[in-house]
Amino acid sequence: AGGGATGAAGGSEFHFGRKKMASRIRKVLAAGVVGGLLAAFASYAFAQDKIMVGGVLYGRDSQYWRLIERGMTDAAAANNAELTIGLNGRQLATEAQVVEDMMTRGVKAIIISILDENASAAILRDARDRGIVVVEDGTHLKDKTVANYSVEVDQKEAARVVGAEMVNYIKNDLGGKAKVGLAVLPPQNPQATDRNGSIVDMLKELPDVEIVAQVNANT
């Protein structure tokens, strides 16, 4: 979730601490993705040959997913693995096809940010039944018997970091008064409640801040 605020004085826009925020988020995401890949590689620690690993992303249309891909690429290189990336385009049918293609190509592990906590289970259960290591990255299935490993960034904490930057800006640069518009995760995203709710709760602590709009963004 991200946001914009306009203060009463000067009508200025803000983009809170982009460089600092990007640095923090990059470290968190890189640690999470590398952790997931290392978990996958652990099952093949004694393999002689380079293994093939699949990574499934929503897209490459935001910094978030580009950072995830960078983390996967770095971890694969560090562990002498061949990485193939697939994009689900935020479509369940495409997600299933990407996973099926990776199974056909002979990947030994799939690291995936799932689209739906229920509907994504069938194709990943098929992958696990074929002996492929399944690693959930960031979003998770309700059925905890499918994935071999799960990697999670604390969504509430990530939101609090963003929210704190927003609150500090409003207090220090806008005199504590602002009208705020939020571009939030859509409700079907499993992270939406924690991410969106934490930011809204922090903004509500400021009595002279009004949230005037919340618009669902791409996930």
Image: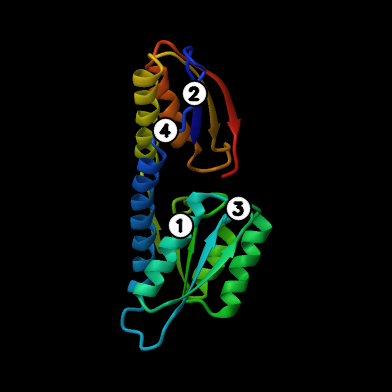
Farthest residue to the front: give it: 10
Identify residue for label 1: 68
Q: Position of residue 93 (x, y in %)?
A: 68, 58
Q: CA distance from mark 1 to mark 2?
A: 28 Å
Q: Which mark is residue 16?
A: 4
Confirm whether residue 161 shows in the render: yes
Query: What is the crowding at mark 4: few (fewer than 14 residues within 10 Å), some, or many (at least 20)?
Result: many
Label 4 to label 1: alpha-carbon separation: 22 Å
Query: Vertically, is 106 above or below 214?
Result: below
Provide residue 213's location: percent of width, then percent of height. 58, 22
* Observer able to see residue 147: no
Tag nearer the camera, 4 or 1: 4
Asked if residue 118 is positioned above or below residue 180 in the image, the reply reads: below
Q: Nearer the viewer, mark 4 or mark 3?
A: 4
Q: Which color scheme did the rendering employ for the protein?
A: rainbow
Tag 2 residue? 5
Mark found first going from the N terminus, 1 or 3: 1
Of 185 and 145, which appears nearest the observer?
Answer: 185
Which residue is identified by label 3? 119
* Rendered residue at 41%/21% (across/down): 203
Q: Is tag 4's residue or tag 3's residue first in the polypeptide sequence? A: 4
- Looking at the picture, which amino acid does disc 2 mark? Ala
Q: Earlier in the sequence, mark 1 or mark 2?
A: 2
- In the picture, measured across the screen, residue 200 lies left or right of residue 96, that is left
* 169 shown above or below 55: above
Query: Mark 1: which amino acid?
Result: Ile
